[in-house]
Image: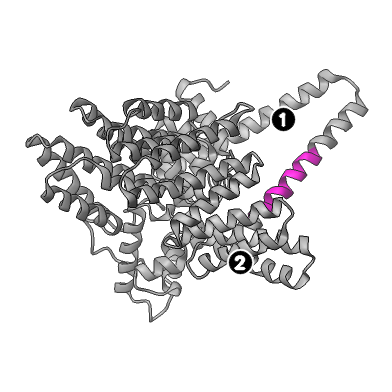
Amino acid sequence: MKTQILLSFAFLLICSLSFAQIAEIPKSYQIKIGQYQEELKTHPEAAQKKLLTLINEAEKKGLHLVSIRAYEVFAYRYATIGDGQNALKYAKAAVELAEQHDYPAEAAVMYGVIGQQYGRMGMDDDAKEYIQKGIDLIKKPKNDAEKHHLGNLYSYRLYTKETSKDSSQIYLKYAKLALASYLTIDNEELREKSSVLGYGNVGMCYSELKQYDSAIAALDKVLAINKGKNAYMSGNAYLQKGMLFLDKKQPDSAEANLKKSEKNFSGKEFINEEKELYSHFIKLYELKGDPNKLKEYKSAYLELENRQQKSRLGTATELLKNENKEKKTVISNFYKVAVGLGIVIISLLIILGIQRIKYRREKAAFDAFRNNRISDEKYSAGNHLTENNPEIKATPEKVQKNDALNEETEIRLLQGLEKFEKEHGYNEKGIALGKIASQLNTNTKYLSMVIKNHKADNFSNYINTLRINYIVDKIENAPEYRKYKLSYLAEETGFSSANAFSKVFKDVTGVSPSSYISLLGKEKTNDFT
């Protein structure tokens, strides 16, 4: 199933609705958990300590549902920010407690979160297994909470990959099951919020099947129920309708809906959605033959693209050039050998020789990188400053002469960068020098100077090296990371695409991610043949 815009919003909606439906716990604990849940967004370390203390206290008093709820707060928080490993860790802890103390609805909810995370990692068989476990636990829901959870579980199935030729029909089946469960909810507010999601996903599935009228009818239901309450949902519904009318070659209807979508998205920083919208305006005005409007929306699209990721186009172009050069070289070599000798076995020997040379080069780069990681701590948090040595002095011979950047400011900025590294802030998507400078209460000039004098040649190299060292640590120490898709590794480290991640990984380590994982496996089994 293609990635759909409303579906990308579904998980956040499911998470936000689920908390209100957990079974009752003492009010004092409800208040504390709510406070700590909010605090996780702004002061995660402090909030995490408070929640873990709360879990210990609750377990001593036999308030197991409080502990389950606290684990769920962790699971949802980490799932929302894209930290799949921690989301799985806390969801599984919640499941263990829920099953041990007979809370099937809570176990079902967390089985869904586990399945959704495995789906994001490309482990679709595991994802389906866990989601089905959740469905089986509450297949006959007894109350609104369980009806809502069951609908969510069916919605999670839309995140898993289906390979059969009937995959679109399978997705439609689960979307309809989810909607049917949502529509049985008695609470009007919860039923409306949930059914907006349900109708949206049904509409997407009909769209995949090219059943345009059914898809438009489902999206009209979204708009009728939402009634403009949620600009995001309305904007996406109108966008999808506009796309459908474009497919139907009805440009006037497409334009009307795309304009309504633009009104909902405008000025609200929904950059990905606006880019999608502008791309369909471009198709529309190409179809209508309106050069002025076409130029306007092409400019708008390019401006957003530039804001989001300035370097992506250059990276993609470079990758394409290199790929074409490699292809030309291989073809040229093949024909030279074929014409000169005409013997297949010689061609094979040459290819094997090239592969052997490539392997030796990769092995040398792999060894050099790993040896450097042991001896060179340039990028490790705490190399320049540590909690036990707050009075560390700047290195005069390395600091550019600038009266405005005094030693006190330099040390403060280095301490700020140490905290930034420890908290893995470099893995945030779209991280920018200006944002870090703002967080450290300085300007980009001073921050650039400190980075250049103490960290790397420039900000981009600094962030990229931190990201690659982070993911290398994961690959080295967490074996499950060697099974994940490149797209998941790229997403975890804040890269815009798997290609961009692979290129930077090779620039830093000297080998591609797949080669690194292969060589690491050979090292652990002593199989360097």
Alpha carbon separation for disc pair 2 and 1: 56 Å
Residue 236 in view (yes/no): yes
Q: Position of residue 306 (x, y in %)?
A: 60, 65
- If the image is split into quadrants, where does the C terminus sit? top right
The three-letter amino acid code for the residue at tag 2 is: Lys
| Residue range of the region highlighted in magenta in the rendering | 315-329
In the picture, measured across the screen, residue 140 lies left or right of residue 325, that is left
- If the image is split into quadrants, where does the N terminus sit? top right
Q: Secondary structure at mark 2?
A: helix
Tally the numbered discs.
Answer: 2
Does label 2 or label 1 sit earlier along the sequence? 2
In the picture, measured across the screen, residue 356 lies left or right of residue 519, that is right
**Does the magenta segment cover residue 323?**
yes
Residue under pointer 2: 259
Q: Residue furthest right?
A: 339
Which of 346/10 is in front?
Answer: 10
At 34% from the left and 32% from the top, the residue drawn is 111
Taking 406 as reference, is 271 above or below it? Answer: above
The three-letter amino acid code for the residue at tag 1 is: Ile
In the picture, measured across the screen, residue 92 lies left or right of residue 11, that is left
Mark 2 crowdedness (10 Å alpha carbons): few <14, some 14-19, many ≥20? some
Q: Position of residue 422 (x, y in %)?
A: 33, 52
Q: Position of residue 382 (x, y in %)?
A: 31, 53
Which of 158/402 is in front?
Answer: 158
At 59% from the left and 46% from the top, the residue drawn is 215
Residue under pointer 1: 354
Labelled pair 2, 1 in contact (Cβ < 8 Å): no
